[in-house]
Image: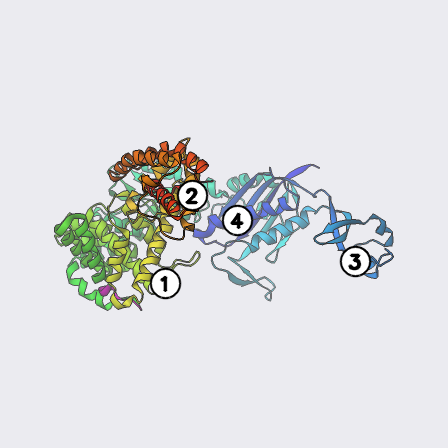
Amino acid sequence: MTTKNLLVELFVEELPPKALKALGEAFSTTLADSLKASGLATAHSAVTAFASPRRLGAHISAVRSQADDKPVSQKLMPVGVALDAAGQPTPALLKKLGALGFDAGAVPQLKRQPDGKTEALFLDVVVKGATLADGLQKALDEALARLPIPKVMQYQLADGWTSVNFVRPAHGLVALHGADLVPVQALGLTSGRETRGHRFEAAIDPVMLLDADHYARQLLEQGAVIASFADRHAEISRQLRAAAAREGLTPIDDAALLDEVTALVERPNVLLCRFEEEFLAVPQECLILTMKANQKYFPLLDAAGKLTNRFLVVSNISPADPSRVIEGNERVVRPRLADAKFFFDQDRKKTLASRVEGLAKVVYHGKLGTQGERVERVRAIARAIGERLGGTALAADADTAARLAKADLLTDMVGEFPELQGIMGGYYARADGLGETVADAIEDHYKPRFAGDQLPRNDVGIAVALADKLETLVGLFGIGQLPTGDKDPFALRRHALGVVRMLVERQLALDIDALIDTAVKTFGPLVADPARTVGLVVDFMFDRLAVSLRDQGYGAQEIDAVLSRRSSRVHEVPRALAAVRAFAALPEAASLAAANKRVGNILNKSDAPPAAAADPARFVEPQERALFDALQAASAPSAAAFERGDYTASLQALAVLKAPVDAFFDGVMVNADDPALKANRLALLASLHAAMNRVADLSKLAA
């Protein structure tokens, strides 16, 4: 059967820009998947998504007008119900056949087949393939029902009675199979071949579509609309780079902003604008944020990454003289920048230190007190960490930074732009003459804020950032506010991963159990069960570490082998993983891992703990002596390598034990009748087990 390309478009009022990309992808994907499932499209049918501010569409290649007929073996009923004792059809069977369009003459064609514990009768029938009209109607209904709509609105149709729920009011529906109209309905609309172009710049309105394949071209040439989200995105990116290059500058890199602007315009036109240089005295983060968040502008940076007084606007119109558009945007941005300058000037009239007292009036959490109380807990944790990292001086700086870190929450700038908390604190600390070390720590104490974010720049910042995250984790775990499923309203997973990243990437020799215990003690009676809280938070930390390691490409066995030891020195995990990976590549690894697992099982089943060391005088079999001697020879270099942190060498020194271990298990009965002999052999195996599992639990590598 010949195929044609299919075009479906839903024309609507302006869609929510932050959701448009996802809406377009979901609409086209669900349509195509449903058509493939009904046999109207093939696995090789190409799908092109269209999404602009006022339309969702899909172009699907190689779509049939009718799907192939399919032979189906249809189950009727159990044999005991379908046939009587004489093997004749029962009324129930005849009624079932009648409902399917058959009479008693079809009984000889029925097949007996096993159906679980019984036999059933099956009828072989041919199901007629779905027509495109029916299949597309089903696909369209499914696509609309499964759209990831952020918020549904209700509106009335033209009859004044019927109400429809959808993301925005819909005004047009197109469904073309080649040049042929496919009759379908949706949202009170009946399909046609007419769509609308740009509100102001369409050359022809409405646009009468010739066929499915001319859709994008006609919209561009007649309707002044780039229908494809991807094409519009690429065109905006190209124009931004070109306009910036003409000025010798670079547009700010913001993927989310670019996606949002792509969803706001139908035919982009990038224009260069300017603002007064006096505003550059305001921290550039403030200016950039207000331009991006409030106006959807693209600030321009110089070669050093510093903000300039020029920015780019993506206009939805292309007048012959763009000066009025440029002037309008420059006029609109000026009050925004003036507000930022006013906030900055006003905030600097008070020091950060003078604001700290006000934190006692800001509620942090109903069960955990105020921000002021929280600051005192963070200070105590930061001092302890600072002492361990760098002694008294570092502890003092960490205390100062922790005391002031939340003070910018009470500033006008952060009140207007919460995203700037920490950043503004750093600027105000410098204005207060607190020095770069403390200012950087205040600015960085929220870091890392997301995957891939930078870590704090100095040890003071590390101490305060660790303290801040540990206080959050311990406090919320202590009152039972644990993440559940995909719900994590306090971003505790992100906090835990931030702690892990700082410990590992900065190679901080800090005991994670001791850190959490220190944090727990700062809460006093607010944490009802301190021991349980420590255990919960430690387990949570290791869970996040395991997830992070999987994301980095480590295998499940490698991770399990290292983390099952539950070493509180998290910074050593990367070296241990590298050692395990190197060990697993050795030819002796599989045998030794299996033997280690066997040894562990034997020791676990033992009635009493083994002696501290085996007594060579009690050896009976030569294999016992051989294993003892080999273990003595290998343990010394393995232990020495372990102590100096060379975990790879520590594990590889044990490779020589393969032969004596194999010989031991081939020739020695561990569970001997003589209790003393059995205890001595268990002691030997315990020494072997301890030597093999210094770095990781090698039994986890056994298949």
- Element under label 1? loop
Q: Residues within 10 Å of mark 2 (few under 14, many from 20)?
A: some
Residue 651, image x, y percentages: 33, 36
Q: Position of residue 479 (x, y in %)?
A: 33, 65
Disc 3, disc 2: CB below 8 Å?
A: no
Q: Camera-side residue: 545 or 68?
A: 545
Mark 1 or mark 4, which is nearer the start of the sequence?
4
Q: Quadrant of the N terminus?
A: top right
Image-based side of 344 in relation to 186, left or right: left
| Residue labelled with disc 4 | 26
Q: Nearer the viewer, mark 2 or mark 4?
A: 2
Across and down, in percent, residue 477 comes to 34, 61
Q: CA distance from mark 2 to mark 4?
A: 63 Å
Mark 4 touches mark 1? (CB < 8 Å) = no
Q: CA distance from mark 4 to mark 3?
A: 48 Å
Give the extent of the magenta segment. 366-373
Q: Is residue 3 magenta?
A: no
- 351 or 319, which lies in front? 351
Q: Is residue 243 visible?
A: yes
Q: Are the residues tagged 2 and 4 within 8 Å (C-beta)?
A: no
Three-letter amino acid code at disc 1? Gln
Residue 585 in view (yes/no) = no
Q: Secondary structure at mark 2?
A: loop
Residue 661 location in percent, x, y? Answer: 40, 36
Mark toward the viewer: 1 or 2: 2
Q: Give the residue drawn at x 60%, y 51%.
A: 140
Label 4: element kind: helix
Q: Residue at x 55, y 54 (%)?
A: 146
Q: Which residue is mark 3?
A: 80
